[in-house]
Amino acid sequence: MKVVGVGITPPVYKVSGGISAGVQLMERVAALAETRMFLMSDRDEDSVENGLKVVRRRPTNIFGSLQRGIAKQLVTLMWRPRFQAWLAEAKPDVVHFHNPHPPGALLEATRACKRLGIPYVVSTHGFVEMDDVVKSFGGHAWLRPLYRLAIRRPLVEVVRNAARILMLSPQEEPILRGMGARPDQLSVVTNGVDPFFVHSIAQQDRLSLVSRFALPQGMPLMLFVGNHTPNKGLDVLLKALPLMKQPGVAVVAGAITSRDAHERLLCQSGLGAATDRLIFTDFITKEELRALYQSVDIFVFPSRADTLSLVILEAMASGLPVVSTTVGGIPYEVSDDTGILVPPGDAVALAAALDKLCLQPKLRESFGAAAAARVHRLFDWKASAALAVDIYRGVVSTRVGR
């Protein structure tokens, strides 16, 4: 059986969570079936990475060299993969799509499969966020009809023509049913956690990696990891900090891509850059992130929209209790004995949850131990790859039997 994984992403973006998850899954699939991964990229390159054959190809854009004079969001939506000719030559038995952005690129690639008579399956990375872009990322309600046309409508066609939909959590079923998916199309094939984050590092190495962040001692440290965009809810965390009654410092990890946007975020939250409640790391390496997971007390992720967060799994695997929200697949990740979930956008509830964990070190320890055990039990890439391969075989055998 020949399998092709496909990662849909604008070439100007750094690797997204959906692409990272897709690559990690297909690396494990490659141990079970002949597999290649096709990625939209900023370069044309063939390579072998962790046993997976990776094909990178530059996509096209109707705006060509005029991109600098056009709104970034519009340019992003118009990237399209150079996929059909490559697919016709590759001749896989089944194609597995990852990441839905830009939706038009995903739709064009799935139509190529349909034209060539090749069945495809789709993992639902980002589907929660894309189901209602205004709710997820903010914006004017009058834009909803446009977003439905440009974003949700392509996803509906992708879903309805898929041989199977691989949900990351059962919580997605209502969204997919709303897009026209049939019950027999749906299976749960969830994310795993990168083993890199499971292993403890030596004390000296950990201290060396976090030394540039000047982490304070003697009070609980709360770590946020993610883009500083509305969907991740960093603004809610910043509003919650002044409401907290217990001492604690929030460590905000992630690149500051715009100084102007950063200053606006601080101003809107009522915080100043010099507050003793807050540390911004700016860009961090993977090694520094692991060291931070192993140096803090609480993981906080007040997301407004997330299908199934990889950073939550990484934090749980590192033995951290989680404070997050009741959106998307997060309740599938964070059970009652591993953390506290609050409504999205509720700074008061977030502050209360953080206060509770800051005040109770034994509760943090209990939640953290249960979190590590839960990740080990339920979120494993090898197990997910085995499930995916079983689904591929079912799809291929159904096609052959027709």
Image: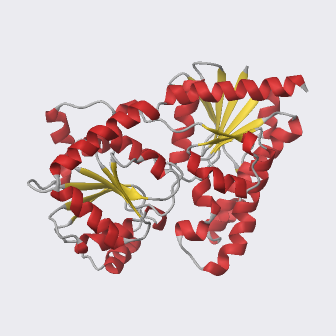
The answer to whether 343 is drawn above or below residue 225 in the figure is below
Of residues 252 and 192, the one drawn nearer to the viewer in this rendering: 192
Position of residue 297 in the picture relative to residue 109 (left or right): left
Toward which corner of the image does residue 341 lie, by quadrant? bottom left
Name the residue at 68% across, 65% down. Answer: 66
Provide residue 2's location: percent of width, then percent of height. Answer: 72, 22
The answer to whether 112 is drawn above or below residue 144 in the figure is above
Q: Colour scheme in the image?
A: secondary structure
Quarter of the figure with the C terminus: top right
Residue at far left of view: 218
Provide residue 187's location: percent of width, then percent of height. Answer: 65, 38
Name the residue at 50% across, 30% down. Answer: 381
Toward which corner of the image does residue 257 lie, by quadrant? bottom left
The answer to whether 109 is drawn above or below residue 254 in the figure is above
Toward which corner of the image does residue 258 lie, by quadrant? bottom left
Tally of numbered discs: 0
Quarter of the figure with the N terminus: top right
Name the residue at 15% across, 34% down. Answer: 203
Position of residue 283 in the picture relative to residue 48 (left or right): left
User: Is residue 399 in view?
Assistant: yes
Residue at far front of view: 336
Provide residue 158's location: percent of width, then percent of height. Answer: 76, 49
Provide residue 183's location: percent of width, then percent of height. Answer: 73, 44
Position of residue 157 in the picture relative to residue 269 (left or right): right
User: Is residue 318 in view?
Assistant: no
